[in-house]
Amino acid sequence: MTIRRTPSTRLSLVAVALVASAVLTGCERPPPESVQHGFRGTGMVQVYNARTLEAQAPNNVVPDPVPAVPGDGPKAKDVYKNVQVLGDLSVAEFNRTMVAISAWVSPKEQCTYCHMAGEGFESDSMYTKVVARRMLQMTQAINSKWSAHVGGTNGNGAGVTCFTCHRGQHNPSELWFRAPPQVQASRALGNDAGQNRPSPGVTLASLPYDALTDYLLDAKEIRVGGTTALPTGNRQNIKQTEFTFALMIHMSNSLGVNCTYCHNSQNFAGWEGAPPQRVTAWHGIRMAREINNVYMEPLQAVFPAARLGPTGDVAKVGCATCHQGAYKPLYGANMLKDYPVLGRITGSTAGPVVAGPIAGLLGRVLFDTGKFDLTPDAKKQIAAASQALARDASLKVDLSGFTDRTGNANANAELAKNRAFAVRDALTAAGVPQARINLRKPELVIAGADGSSRRVDLVAVK
Ligand code: HEC
Ligand code: HEC
Ligand code: HEC
Ligand code: HEC
């Protein structure tokens, strides 16, 4: 069949072409600028769009430093009760640092984001404070151990403060989690290795959607070229190449650059002729692994469930967490010089002590806000516990009541006691003798902010 072109269809084709060219040129107006990056003739040019750069600028404004204070006078560790990292600072400098981290992480709540009103500043009852202490240690480690990447304290580069990642927010805006396991539609389709599930992490390309677990948490090799002629026993297959490219897309995107910022496109694998930024990036990959394995992963038990990812893992750091689209975070501004304590390791480097699952927990009875009535679910829990006690006559049970952190402290202590009494009465009604029940007041009655704080724990003891 042939299409007969009438004058009117010809006209509309011209119109379509005109509209299309207007739309296409409109995409990149004002014209992108290209900046030569490598040697002449290597085609290593960076392309920047002025509008993108302009849109990014507000996110890269650095806050004014908190005014300087005297560095002498008594030390924080001699005046305060529970200072483990910043103890060598003068009291004035310590408080200046507290003011700075409030502005960087919790400008709205200020001190109360990490310190509970009505409790001493030394208390570690809020998880945010426990995390913040680990973050102080982490920031010190990044600057002093990874100066090959961040410049840190060697005076040649920007270094990192809490603001580099947080930018005035509780959670940095660029984080990643382990991807949930794939659901295979059919085994006949084989394993697609997470491809064709467009994810923003790889700019919606059909590359594997979770490249970061392999490279920024695990230390899989980042290679595409095999070392043997036949693909026997090596991972350098097409899938492996695609994973490598997914990581490269993440890196390029995080820095707002293209591949030739780090590679001479003649030879992607070769280090000769590659710009020095590739070496900086190589250290960055190792640094991100250390941040995630040594600092983030062990904090999993400290974070509340609402902060965890789809598979229950803790948030992790990628290149974008610090860079946020800029070739250097905050365009290379050095905030560290005003807070030298974040550039060297001071005080303890040990992680927080996290209580594991409670040994012998027989049951956990939950309550509604402000109430100590037993819900139907609570009654089921108590019935199960009383059966366990009936099976083993050598067991006794400890009951501890808790509340959430809202409300008045005295009223909460009373409420926690009444909850424990309610469970005790239900157990005796179910036939457990009084002598086998101990009421045990926990050290901290106020347990947290979520529903699991309003509870009574039933713990078996011999
Ligand atoms: C982002 C969390 C965070 C914020 C916000 C914060 N702090 Fe702290 N604060 C900490 C951490 C962590 C420590 C423990 C430091 C250490 O172990 O070296 C601490 C310790 C303290 C101590 C020492 C208490 C003692 O006896 O051990 C004081 C005092 C203090 N902070 C005051 C403040 C004040 C005042 C503010 C508001 C201007 C504030 N903090 C904001 C995390 C925070
Ligand atoms: C903890 C924060 C942090 C993380 C995470 C991070 N970077 Fe950086 N990066 C920096 C800082 C700060 C600088 C600037 C250092 C300086 O001023 O010389 C920098 C500089 C660089 C540079 C040099 C830029 C130039 O023009 O000289 C490259 C390349 C780079 N980073 C790549 C990466 C890659 C790739 C990753 C992820 C694998 C990454 N970074 C992760 C903080 C970070
Ligand atoms: C390399 C990036 C990075 C740096 C630097 C950093 N943090 Fe964080 N911070 C994170 C990540 C990632 C999380 C986890 C966020 C989540 O779970 O959503 C986090 C979480 C926190 C939290 C818990 C917030 C919440 O609401 O759950 C606090 C508090 C905190 N950081 C304080 C600090 C302080 C204080 C500093 C500086 C001493 C600091 N951070 C430096 C990456 C960083
Ligand atoms: C910020 C710097 C940076 C950017 C941008 C970057 N790369 Fe890389 N690339 C590296 C580093 C560093 C390695 C080596 C990683 C290692 O060995 O740990 C690497 C490795 C590779 C490899 C593996 C080479 C081999 O030995 O088999 C290929 C291929 C590659 N990159 C391609 C790309 C492509 C394509 C892009 C653009 C989409 C890109 N890279 C963007 C830094 C970068």
Image: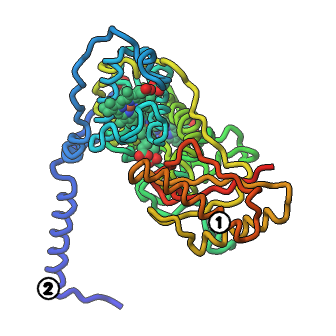
Residue 273 sits in quarter: top left
x and y percentages locating residue 165 in the rendered image: 37, 38
The label nearer to you, 2 versus 1, is 1
Residue 199 found in image quarter: bottom left
Q: Residue at the location (17% across, 58% down)?
A: 26
Indicate the amino acid at tag 2.
Pro
Q: Secondary structure at mark 2?
A: helix
Q: Which residue is mark 2?
A: 7
Residue name at image x 36 percent, y 47 percent: 173
With 372 as the anchor, is 169 left or right in this view? left
* Residue 289 rendering spot, x and y as whole percentages: 55, 36
Q: Residue at x 33, y 44 (%)?
A: 169
Residue marked by disc 1: 425
Crowd rating for badge 1 (residues with CA inside 10 Å; few <14, some 14–19, many 20+):
few
Q: Amino acid at mark 1?
A: Asp
Residue 322 seen in this snapshot: no
The furthest residue to the bottom: 1
Camera-nearest residue between 454 and 40: 454
Residue 112 coordinates in the image, percent (x, y): 34, 40
Q: Can residue 49 be seen? A: yes
State the image quarter where residue 14 is shown. Answer: bottom left
